[in-house]
Amino acid sequence: MRKGVGFTKKVLLFLNNKLSVTQKAAISFVLVILVGAFLLTLPFSSTDNTSTPFINALFTATSASCVTGLVVYDTFTHWSLFGQTVILLLIQIGGLGLMSALYMIFFVRNKNLGLKEKELVRESFSPPAFMGVKELSKTIILGTFFFELLGAIFLSVRFVPEFGLFRGIYYSIFHSISAFCNAGFDLMGIKQPGSSLNLYYDDILVNITIIMLIVIGGLGFYVWSDIAKNRHHVSKYSLHTKIVLTSTLLLIAIPAAIIFVIEYFGGSFSELSLKGSVLSSVFQSVTLRTAGFTTVDYTLLNDGIIMIMLVVMLVGGSPGSTAGGIKTTTFSVLVLSISSVLKNREAPECFGRRLELNALKKAAAILIVYVALVITGIVILCFMDDVTLKEAAFECVSATATVGLTLGITSSLSVISKITVILLMFFGRIGCLSMILALSKTYRPTSAQKPLEKIAIG
């Protein structure tokens, strides 16, 4: 027995020394998903007390842990209270980040993180140099619970009178966590299965609360810290914060305006009131930032709107946030780089600062990897299932950017297609570039440089 324990200890020590930080983070995330999938297969996780097929449990656990929101079952009608609780815990772990959850345990036990644990936290959220791991972790934990509690209080004003005291409070907490973590899971199947928040399309309280939770969760944890530290002194904000806030505002306002104009004047919003149309336009623009909630039927939207949605979904939220996608800063660097080329400048510039050229290389790599994954997913879905190119593209972008929106094909996908979507969600949450680095061998830099030679571009 002791030999077995000793062998196991040696294997763990070997893996601990041989695995990179990125690999450890990815493996830890896989373990969380597998544990969640196992719990969801148990008979008492479903409302009819039958065992859920493992592939569907794995799909749900991955979607919850990767805070995506794509589902093969309606969350209320299929999952029991135990199953819903498992999903909610996976959402919270996925939103906080596994290593932040680890820090919370250490914090409660009044212990400090070791150097390896600190490295894992930094790897999980890639914070700028101006934030320490301890400051980052406290900001994540305290900020998350504060905003989720505030959101639950506002939602309870609507849900408690509608569903009763205990169920109303539970629904408020569930949807507040799901919205802040940009997960998109809902329990509105109690009213109409698969309806998400469609029945609240013109409810100002529900719309504004969910919108604010999504936006705040998608800004990034260290943007909160910068805003809290400098408050209204915008000039003192870091370049990162300025870029995040500016790009977030533009990526909400512009798509919302386009959706409103096209859909209200002769589109699917033409029969809605002006208030309902405005709220629906803004809500869809915000939820595309990887939230996954809906207040309208996407199958009725104009194809041009769907194309805009694909772009906004791919961009996603900001680094170090609960959102996915290539991130607003990546998108901003690419746009600024185009501007610098047109102005014949050596490097991108923004807010009186010059961006490092390495940022452009990383941004281009991230975009190419994401697009490659999406295209691969589209090919597989179109080959394996009877779906249109539009449906497959929407599903794959939604999965890779951990958005959670769909045109209604998720539950009917084949096993191979479900596995494909599972991998897209996982890669999207871990970070496509980080995942490739985790799978690749450790890079050893060298001082030797190859001869330089120019090639024609464009």
Image: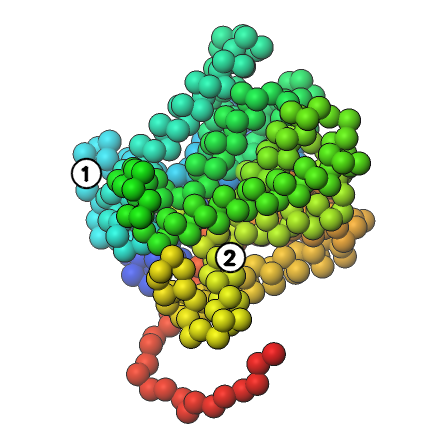
Instruction: Check disc 2 and give the amino acid type.
Output: Phe
The one of 45 and 138 positioned closer to us in this rendering: 138
Determine whether the residue tagged by mark 1 lies in a helix, strand or loop.
loop
Q: Which residue corresponds to the image point at 32% horizontal and 81% vertical from the top-left?
A: 446
Determine whether the residue tagged by mark 2 lies in a helix, strand or loop.
helix
* Residue 432 position in % (x across, y down): 50, 58
* Residue 99 position in % (x across, y down): 34, 44
Circles 2 and 1, Cβ within 8 Å, touching? The answer is no
Residue 55 seen in the figure: no
Horizontal side of 363 relative to 15 (left or right) equals: right
Q: Residues within 10 Å of mark 2 (few under 14, many from 20)?
A: many
Q: Nearer the viewer, mark 2 or mark 1?
A: 2
The one of 271 and 76 positioned closer to us in this rendering: 271
* Residue 59 position in % (x across, y down): 59, 41
Label of residue 331 in the image = 2
Q: Which residue corresponds to the image point at 49% horizontal and 35% vertical from the top-left?
A: 214
* Residue 239 position in % (x across, y down): 35, 54
Name the residue that disc number 1 marks.
111
The one of 234 and 128 positioned closer to us in this rendering: 234
Q: Which residue corresponds to the image point at 57% horizontal and 81% vertical from the top-left?
A: 457
Q: Residues within 10 Å of mark 1 (few under 14, many from 20)?
A: few
Instruction: Check disc 1 and give the amino acid type.
Output: Lys
